[in-house]
């Protein structure tokens, strides 16, 4: 389950807790806390444990921030001439194969 890694780290640091302290409070391994703070991945049981320890609702930790517009990149196949050529060649081969099968 995806959770907001930054929120977990921020809540932990606001309380002055180490990762080990949080792991002990949630009865999970420190490696799990490290993974949560790095990747934002946790099981539902771990999420419930974090919510109980931090005394917050699940929605607080489930809110994953959306990237801002300037962080998004639009890629057009027309901006990638190599991809356009490969797609055209593959399309031509598929078209030729289909024509060959139906014309013979």
Image: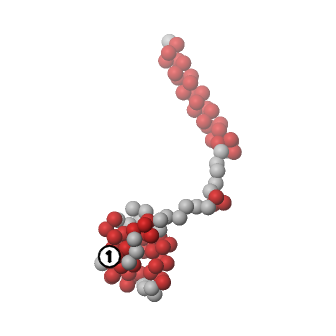
On screen, 19 above or below 72? below
Residue 15 position within the rendered picture, expressed as x and y whole percent measured from the top left: 45, 85
Using the rendered view, name the quadrant where residue 96 is placed.
Answer: top right
Vertical relation: 92 (above or below) 25: above
Residue 74 appears in view: yes
Residue 102 location (% of width, % of height): 50, 15
Q: Nearer the viewer, residue 49 or 31?
A: 49
Quadrant for the N terminus, please.
bottom left
At a point 58% along the width and 61% down the height, the residue shown is 67
Does the rendering let one see residue 50? no
Place residue 86 in its image quadrant: top right
Dot 1 corresponds to which residue?
A: 28
* 37 left or right of 68 in image: left
Left or right of 45 in this view: 88 = right
The residue that appears at 33% across and 82% down in the rendered structure is 24
What residue is at 49 percent from the left and 64 percent from the top? 64
Front-lying residue, 82 or 23 = 23
- SS for tag 1? loop
Front residue of 93/14: it is 14
Q: In this figure, what is the number of numbered marks?
A: 1
Left or right, 95 with reference to 77? left
Using a 10 Å C-alpha cutoff, classify the residue at mark 1 as few (fewer than 14 neighbours), some (14 to 19) or many (20 or more): some
Color style of the picture: secondary structure
Q: Quadrant of residue 91?
A: top right
Instruction: Locate residue 26, reporting x and y percent.
Output: 33, 78
Extreme residue toward the bottom, this view = 16
Residue occupying the far top of the picture? 104
- Residue at the spot x=36%, y=79% of the render? 53
């Amino acid at each position: 389950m995806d959770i907001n890694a930054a929120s977990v780290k921020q809540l932990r640091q606001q309380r002055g807790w180490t990762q080990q302290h949080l792991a002990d409070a949630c009865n999970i391994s420190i490696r799990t806390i490290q993974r949560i703070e790095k990747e934002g991945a946790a099981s539902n049981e771990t999420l419930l444990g974090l919510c109980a320890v931090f005394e917050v609702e699940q929605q607080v930790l489930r809110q994953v921030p959306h990237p801002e517009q300037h962080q998004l990149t639009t890629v057009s196949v027309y901006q990638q001439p190599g991809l356009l050529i490969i797609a055209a060649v593959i399309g031509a081969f598929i078209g030729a194969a289909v024509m060959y099968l139906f014309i013979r």
